[in-house]
Image: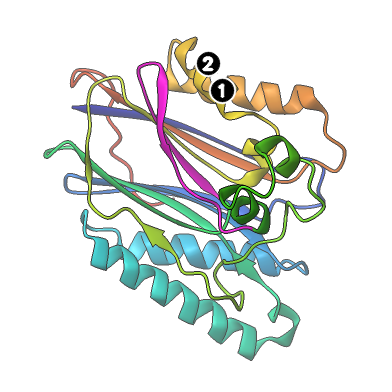
Amino acid sequence: MGISYFAVSGQGGRERNEDSYGYACHGATMTFAVSDGMGGQAGGAIAADIVLATIGQHARALDRNEMLYSYQTIEQEIRQRQQQQLEYQHMGATVAELRIDSERQLALWGHFGDSRVYWLRDNAIMAVTHDHSVVKTLVAAGLISEREAAVHPKKNVLLGAFGVASDAEPEILAAPVSLADGDAFLLCTDGLWNCIPDHDILALCQASSSVEHWVRQLESRLQAAAVAHQDNYTAIGVWITPFDERTVRLDWL
């Protein structure tokens, strides 16, 4: 089994880009992650960097407990920084993380906040993470529609993220899923999925000749939307390919 990937990140219409992303390979385990920082005064960028640095240190295997421990460590690190530097007391960050075991052909993912992991196969989106947000809770309860959620005044209000007081907790897949050639994953912050509907994410993937083509098409679609005050955006596309195609072998970025 081969793995190819491509990533983009941009500041959109903001003064700085407080998103962060990275990828790593430890033996047969390959890890990809994105994080959306928040809190202003550059605190968001610091929080997102803490997320990525900690995952880079702990991502060694498809182990649910190991992933949970890394998330607990992230929370501790961010809380400590909040207490040490009052200008960063409101900083926080999301995460979307994907781990792949290329030998066992399995995948495991986790998330916290409203950064997402999409799993695509054939002509369908097999799974997408559930945002820890006010509007997603309202949609799940049947109180508003997905269309109403897109324009809801509280669409950016999170119920959970690292460094944010809440009852929500990070979610990790209960057990790894089996992979097949042609599977695709998209990890992205809300700056991307807020502007591109799920069906377009799928359609662009189906029409693309490579993972790079797919992710660049997503970025082009985002930029063409010309949303006022466009949020930071980050996306990592990952394709499961025949073994003879390019496979990721990179240190953590």
**Percent position of residue 160, x then y:** 57, 67
Q: Residue 199 bears which disc, if any?
A: 1
**Percent position of residue 116, x then y:** 51, 45
Kind of residue at disc 2: Ala
Mark 1, secondary structure of its residue: helix
Q: Which residue is mark 2?
A: 203
Q: Residue 131 bears which disc, if any?
A: none
Image quadrant of residue 225? top right
**Percent position of residue 15, x then y:** 82, 51
Kind of residue at disc 1: His
23 relative to 216 in the view: left or right: left
* Along the viewing direction, whichever of 247 and 92 lies nearer the viewer: 92
> Does 43 sit above or below residue 130?
below
Tell me the distance, in whole angstroms, between the alpha carbons under discs 1 and 2. 6 Å
101 relative to 186 in the view: left or right: left
Image quadrant of residue 223? top right
Image quadrant of residue 197? top right
Mark 2, secondary structure of its residue: helix
* Along the viewing direction, whichever of 28 and 120 lies nearer the viewer: 120
- Density class for disc 1 (Cα within 10 Å; few <14, some 14-19, many ≥20) is few
> Does 27 sit above or below residue 218?
below
**Percent position of residue 230, x then y:** 79, 41
Q: Residue at x 59, y 21 (%)?
A: 200
Q: Residue at x 32, y 25 (%)?
A: 183
CB atoms of marks 1 and 2 within 8 Å: yes
What segment is highlighted magenta in the picture?
115-133
Residue 127 is a magenta residue: yes
> Does 38 sit above or below residue 88?
above
Residue extending furthest front? 142
